[in-house]
Image (spheres, rainbow, N blue to C red):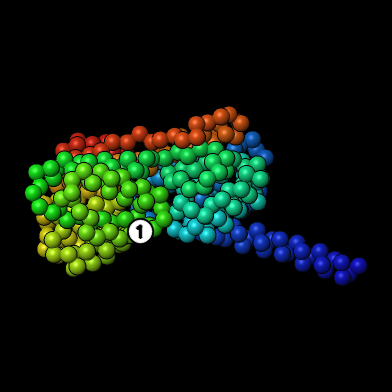
Amino acid sequence: MRKLRTQRAIAVLASVLLVGGVAACGNSDTGGGGSKDDGKITMGFSQVGAESGWRTANTTSIKESAAAAGIDLKFDDAQQKQENQIKAIRNYIQQKVDVIAFSPVVESGWDTVLKEAKDAGIPVILTDRSVDSADKSLYKTFLGSDFVKEGRLAGEWLVEQKKGATGPVNIVELQGNTGAAPANDRKKGFGEAIAANPNLKIIASQPGDFTRAGGKQVMEQFLKANPKIDVLFAHNDDMGLGALEAITAAGKVPGKDITIITVDAVKDGMQALADGKFNFIAECSPLLGPQLMDLAKKVHAGEEVPARIETEETTFTQEQAKEALPNRKY
Ligand code: AHR
């Protein structure tokens, strides 16, 4: 009898430690425990991290919109690690949340955990970035930008600017983190667009991980290795802003000696554009919170939602940035 009680106590302790361990992944304010029975929808959200101004604005949008919509949000910051996102999603499944939403740090490797959510009857919404799963029934919808289009718009602008070029135009590219949808897609769209002019050549392309530090460090290497750089295409504003420091330190004038094109249009990027340090930005909106909460309510109610919802976006020249800056929300 005593042996049986001891065994039970060990089993209870083990399950407490297991749940605690899973909840401890990433940087989480999930609050632990299960889904509350207070009539509120509970959403488990796994965020990529806090790598950029865009990401900070996206997190704020999600948290504020959840509060405004009366949705109980459990939020986990995965600190750029897919394994942390998978742990967080498993934690949300265990807690029996009503809806899971996440922005996948990379495109591949999600099928197993998405199948676990589906088997548990918990709908999944992809936000900002998509996954490459062939089985589209693993998630209800994907809300976010068309990253290929963003790259293409950046490339088309450059083709127009350089249409009179008679010799090679040397381009360096700062990519986002390896395997991320926006890195893959922006590279693709930009490459396809600049193929229209054989003078436009990408002479170096490397990941700067969507961070200012990464952009600065890789741009320093580009500048050392390549005496003639005409254009920088950075997959986001933050890497472009980091690169500005490297360009200035190398004695070159950003926006003049080197044409700089970025993606996002966060405030600091728009300021650099208005100041003449950047030349063009393709917008990527982080304000996905209100639409996400609306979708969560619909999927929770069993309503059909479109499989793909694309964010509305624009582009900015230096003049347009000057006009838009005073009203910019992020
Ligand atoms: O997925 C969106 C991208 O991720 C943004 O362009 C970038 O700034 C962020 O880190």
> Taking 216 as reference, is 226 left or right?
left
Q: Residue furthest front?
A: 198
Locate residue 50, reporting x and y percent: 40, 54
In the picture, residue 177 is in which quadrant?
Answer: bottom left
Type of amino acid at the residue the image marks with label 1: Asp
118 shown above or below 214 = above
> Furthest-right residue in view?
1
46, above or below 250, in the image = above
Using the image, determine if residue 303 lies above or below residue 14: above
Instruction: Name the quadrant of the C terminus.
Output: top left
* Mark 1 surroundings: few (<14), some (14-19) or many (≥20) residues within 10 A: many
At x 14%, y 47%, the residue is 276
- State whether residue 139 appears in this view: no
Secondary structure under tag 1 reads loop
Q: Position of residue 315 (x, y in %)?
A: 25, 38
Residue at image point 52% right, 47% down: 133
Residue in front for this viewpoint, 198 or 241: 198
